[in-house]
Image: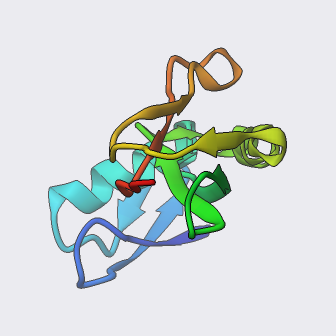
C-alpha cells in the first residue's frame, strides 16, 4: 500500500493506493491527482538565472507547464550557464523546449534596466 498526500486543494487528504484501489480521497480531483502521480508524475520547476544590465543579480524563472519529475534536475542544470540581459518582461521565454518536452522556462518578473 502506498500513501499520497493530495495537493490539489488545502484539505490535504491522505489517499491510500493498494493496486488499483484508492481510498481516503475527499473528492474526485484527489483521485485524479493520485492516478496521475502513479502513472506519470510531473512538477513545475522554479529557479533563477543570472541577470546582466540590472541592479538585481538574478531573474526568477519557472517552467511554462509541468515536466516529468525525473527530468527536473537536468532541466534545472540547463540554467547554470544562462545569463539574461535586462530589460526582461514577465512571461518572456528564457530557455525554449526544455529537453525536448515542448515546455519553456519563462521569466516570472519584469525587470527594467
Which residue is at a point 65% across and 51% down the rendered structure image?
52
Q: Is residue 35 above or below residue 13?
A: above
> Residue 27: x, y in percent?
16, 65
Q: Quadrant of residue 36?
A: top left
Please identify the residue farthest to the left as the structure is shown: 27
> Residue 22: x, y in percent?
39, 60
Q: Nearer the viewer, residue 97 or 60?
A: 60
> Residue 107: x, y in percent?
45, 46
Residue 44 in sight from this viewpoint: no
Q: Nearer the viewer, residue 64 or 91?
A: 91
Which residue is at a point 82% across and 47% down the rendered structure image?
80
Q: Quadrant of residue 25?
A: bottom left
> Residue 85: x, y in percent?
59, 41
Q: How many marks?
A: 0
Residue 96 in sight from this viewpoint: yes
Q: Is residue 75 above or below residue 47?
A: above
Which residue is at a point 47% across and 70% down the rendered structure image?
16
Quarter holding the N terminus is: bottom right
Q: Nearer the viewer, residue 8 or 113?
A: 113
Q: Nearer the viewer, residue 52 or 61?
A: 52
Which residue is at a point 61% across and 67% down the rendered structure image?
2
Q: Is residue 89 above or below residue 93?
A: below
The figure's colour scheme reads rainbow
Quarter holding the C terminus is: bottom left
Q: Quadrant of residue 70?
A: top right
Amino acid at each position: 500500500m502506498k500513501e499520497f498526500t493530495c495537493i490539489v486543494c488545502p484539505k490535504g487528504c491522505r489517499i491510500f493506493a493498494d493496486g488499483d484501489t484508492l481510498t481516503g480521497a475527499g473528492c474526485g480531483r484527489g483521485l485524479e491527482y493520485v492516478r496521475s502521480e502513479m502513472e506519470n508524475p510531473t512538477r513545475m520547476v522554479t529557479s533563477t538565472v543570472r541577470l546582466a544590465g540590472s541592479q538585481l543579480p538574478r531573474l526568477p524563472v519557472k517552467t511554462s507547464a509541468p515536466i516529468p519529475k525525473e527530468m527536473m534536475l537536468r532541466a534545472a542544470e540547463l540554467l547554470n550557464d544562462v545569463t539574461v540581459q535586462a530589460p526582461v518582461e514577465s512571461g518572456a521565454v528564457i530557455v525554449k523546449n526544455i529537453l525536448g518536452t515542448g515546455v519553456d522556462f519563462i521569466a516570472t518578473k519584469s525587470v527594467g534596466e
